[in-house]
Amino acid sequence: MYEKYRKNNIMNVNFLVNQATFMRYYVPLAYEVKMRRHIANFFIGKKPKKYNDPMYKRNFENIKGICKYFKFNLFKIEDCKNFDGITFNIEGNGIKYANKSTQKLVTLTCMNDATARYNGKDAQYINEVDNVILASEFMAKHLNTISHKNMYLGSPKYDFPLNKDKILHRYKLNSKEKYALILYPKLRDLKKINLNKIYDYLRKLGYKLLVKTREKDPVLFHEHRGDFYFLDASWFPSTTIELLNVSDIVINFSSTAIKECVMCKTPVINFDIKPFKLLFDFLYKYDYIIHLDPNVSFDIFSMAVKKLTTQNLESEFNLAIKNHLFESGNVSKKICDALNIL
């Protein structure tokens, strides 16, 4: 079926990059493509007024370094139409630069973003692409994104093995310390919780505070930046996933990052301070998470932290992954097999 994309048994596999955040999904997949002796081409284009614009100098240097290290080809996004093969995009972004007559178009999804472009009058890409790769059939049903084009293969974002010692060294962290990762809430929601109190509680329990946010949502108050403050240090590996792998516990505020917490098997204390209902409420119903009131006392907070960090929660994480998500580690292989990139 895919032989028309091959020349001398070698295939172009193209990746449209008009947001730097896409690299965390693409790199493991492109690495697998290279391991199978095919050609991985990255096509970079602007995303003006976005913190993750690939052409912004710091982002471009990061992407260029990744491509050089892995020996991926790097081109302008406008050049994509000149290449045949299989072309990957994220949520339909950049497909106007693809050539549908000579390329098979495959969309990767960011878990929850697919809904806006999949259904009804807002549908943008589903009719233009050949296949859409989703985390699981459960997730597709939950997001109302069922289609005959769907392939339930997971996300390549979690494929690369991470070494805890290397992560600690990279971020100048001490293996003898205990770390709590604070997924910083939006400025909109800060008035609903006294973060200084929660920080004090954690420090009383002996934790160093890793505060993570996105560049578009910087932490404005210096006292909220904890002991270590992170934006996105690199686009691959994902800074959040690296920090989850060295943290003992996560302080969350009903973020959709709960899926990363589950995939990385890091226990969570959650404060529900968002003005709308949980997007992935089903992931918030297992014993790896404890929900606390923003006005929680130190004694209750302390008991919750102790419970989550002393129990073996492996079976709870595994159950949530089995019921709702996917097994990580070999998704890129599954995608290549399914698309006959052999």
Image (tube, rainbow, N blue to C red):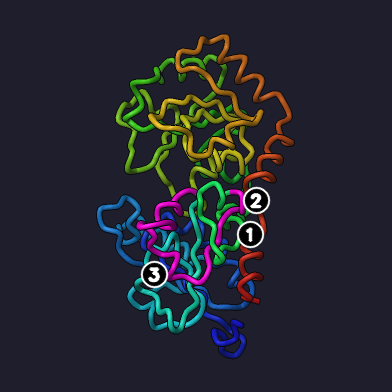
Q: Are marks 3 and 1 in contact (CB under 8 Å)?
A: no
- Mark found first going from the N terminus, 2 or 3: 3
Residue 289 in view of the camera: yes
**Gap between marks 3 and 1, in whole Å?**
23 Å
Quadrant location of the C terminus? bottom right
Amino acid type at circle 1 is Val
Residue 322 in magenta? no
Q: In what element is the residue under mark 1?
A: helix
Which residue in the structure is indicated by mark 1?
Answer: 331
In the rendered structure, find residue 80 and report the number of the disc placed on it. none
Rendered view: 260 above or below 40: above
Task: Classify 10 Å Cα crowding around label 2: few (below 14), some (14-19), many (20 and above).
Answer: many
Amino acid type at circle 2 is Phe
**Gap between marks 1 and 2, in whole Å?**
9 Å
Of labels 3 and 1, the one closer to you = 3
**Left or right relative to 5: residue 331:** right
Rendered view: 109 above or below 104: above
Rendered view: 298 above or below 159: above
Q: Are marks 1 and 2 in contact (CB under 8 Å)?
A: yes
Q: Position of residue 304 (x, y in %)?
A: 61, 18
Which residue in the structure is indicated by mark 3?
Answer: 95
Quadrant location of the N terminus? bottom right
| Residue at 62 percent of width and 70 percent of height | 336
Amino acid type at circle 3 is Ile
* Furthest residue toward front: 120
Please tell me which residue lies in front, 120 or 256.
120
Residue 125 in magenta? yes
Q: Which residues are drawn in magenta? A: 112-138
- Mark found first going from the N terminus, 3 or 1: 3
Please tell me which residue lies in front, 23 or 222.
23
Which residue in the structure is indicated by mark 2?
Answer: 326
